[in-house]
Structure formats: C-alpha cells, structure tokens
Image: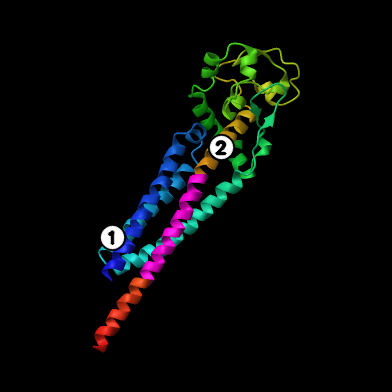
C-alpha cells in the first residue's frame, strides 16, 4: 500500500507541474498587445490553472500521507476541472475559427473586416462603452508611433508586414485611396465612399483610425492570433493532464485492491 501511495503522490506531482504552463499561458496573455486592452481569456485560464494546482497539491498530500479523503477529492475535483478545461479549449477553438485577413493589391500587409470574425468576438468591441475603454488603452501604446521611426518611403511601408492592429488602427483602409506622407499621415483620399472608415480617418495623431471598424477588426485579429497560440499550450497540457489522471485512477484502484486484499488476508489468518 505504501508503494502505491507513493506512486499516486508522484503522479500528482506531475499534475502540479502541468498546472504551471496553464498559469503561464494566462500570464503571457496579460502581456500581449490585444489581450492587455481587452481582458477576456487570461483570467479564466489563470483561474483554471490555479485550481488545478490546488487540487493536484491535495492529491499529492493525500498520496504521500495516505489521506483517503484527499485522494477521493482529487479524483472528483480533477475530473470536473478536466471537463471545464476541455470546454474552454473547445470554446476558444470555435470563436477563433473565423477572422482571416484580406490581401490588398501591391501591399504586403493584410487588412481585416469586423464582419469576418465570430459574433461572440464582435460583441466584445461593438459596444461604444466597451470600445471607449479599449480605444484609450490602444492610444496609450506606441504601436503607431513606432511605424514613423521605421518607415520613411512609401514602398518600404507598403512592403512591411504590419501587425493586424497596426494595419487596422494606424493607417486608413487601402481602398480609400489616401496618399502616403508618412505611416500615420495620409492625404487626398480618392474614394471616401468606399468604406465608412474612410471618413473616420484623422491625421490627428491621437485619433488616426482608432474609431474605425478596421481598428476593431485588427484588434480582434491580434486577439485571435494570441488565443490560438495559448490554445495550443492548453490542448497539449490537457492531453497530458488526462493521461496523468487516468494513470492516477488506475493507481488509486490498485492501491484500494491491495488494501482490501491485505485486510482479507489478515482476517483470514
């Protein structure tokens, strides 16, 4: 029985270690450009990671110190957390399916449209109240100012691989036909009726295209990219966590079988 309990404890130690990449993924999201302005996924991920850590610690203590109630708690709670994490992974996968950028003629960067994203993501930025706070956050960054330091000539800018947020927020849509002066200053639009964002563009450096739907779409495109990367970590960790849980269940069952057999032998003797 002691050997089985040590095995269970060792298995739960692995579960403790598996909580680290989950918590790390949540912390990583808090520092990413889009997620730092629209705080949605990082806290659920961090909370799930912390809960897994606490439950795994309970199983670790129960395994090494033969506390049966803690082991039972671990088995039930960890199963619920695995199901919760599976739901989170599926949810992130579903809401990030859509949102690919559109290729523009003679441009290396892509442009994004709000309608191309899932309805759930669109609702995160459509509310004027929500967007005002997000817009203030975007305005406090240096993502647009950095473009002026990096690109002087039009062709260099057109050949640049901009981030979705830079493409959507720092310049007017290509179809408006604005003339390049510098990355954040454009003049003489050809077709202001091509898109409502053509009228939203402002050369005022605190305004730019922060009120444009293209900026909202660029933010969601960045968010989508960050969430998909985090989801890869969650999927790998979830698979490992399921494997550890199943091994733990087998070890727990074998320990109980061994315990019953020992008691039977003692009673028979």
Q: Which residue is mark 2?
A: 225
Considering only order in the chain, which callout, 2 or 1, is on the residue closer to the N terminus?
Answer: 1
Q: 62 and 190: which one is in front?
A: 62
Q: Secondary structure at mark 2?
A: helix
Could you tell me residue 232's position as x and y percent? 52, 45
Could you tell me residue 205's position as x and y percent? 55, 16
Could you tell me residue 133's position as x and y percent? 51, 32
Name the quarter where the C terminus is drawn. Answer: bottom left
Which dot marks residue 61? Answer: 1
Please say if 197 is above or below 94.
above
The CA span between labels 1 and 2 is: 39 Å
Q: 40 and 104: which one is in front?
A: 104
Q: Residue 72 falls in which quadrant of the image?
A: bottom left
On the question of residue 202 being in view, the answer is no
Q: Which residues are magenta?
A: 232-253
Q: Is residue 58 rendered to the left or right of residue 86?
A: left
């Amino acid at each position: 029985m002691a050997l089985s309990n040590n095995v269970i404890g060792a298995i739960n130690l692995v579960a403790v270690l598996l909580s680290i990449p989950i918590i790390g993924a949540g912390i990583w999201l808090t520092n990413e450009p889009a997620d730092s302005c629209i705080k949605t996924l990082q806290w659920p991920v961090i909370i799930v990671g912390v809960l897994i850590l606490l439950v795994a610690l309970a199983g670790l203590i129960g395994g090494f110190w033969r506390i049966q109630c803690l082991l039972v708690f671990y088995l039930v709670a960890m199963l619920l957390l695995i199901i919760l994490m599976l739901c989170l992974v599926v949810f992130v996968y579903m809401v990030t399916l859509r949102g690919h950028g559109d290729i523009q003629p003679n441009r290396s960067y892509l442009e994004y449209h709000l309608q191309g994203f899932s309805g759930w993501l669109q609702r995160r930025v459509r509310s004027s109240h929500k967007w005002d706070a997000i817009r203030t956050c975007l305005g406090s960054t240096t993502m647009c100012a950095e473009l002026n330091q990096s690109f002087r000539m039009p062709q260099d800018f057109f050949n640049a691989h901009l981030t979705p947020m830079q493409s959507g927020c720092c310049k007017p849509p290509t179809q408006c036909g604005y003339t390049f002066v510098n990355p954040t200053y454009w003049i003489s639009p050809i077709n202001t009726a091509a898109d409502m964002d053509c009228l939203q563009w402002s050369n005022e450096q605190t305004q730019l295209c922060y009120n444009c739907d293209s900026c909202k779409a660029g933010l969601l495109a960045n968010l989508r990219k960050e969430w998909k990367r985090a989801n890869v970590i969650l999927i790998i960790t979830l698979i490992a966590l399921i494997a550890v849980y199943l091994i733990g269940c087998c070890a727990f069952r074998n320990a109980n079988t061994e315990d019953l057999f020992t008691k039977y032998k003692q009673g028979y003797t």
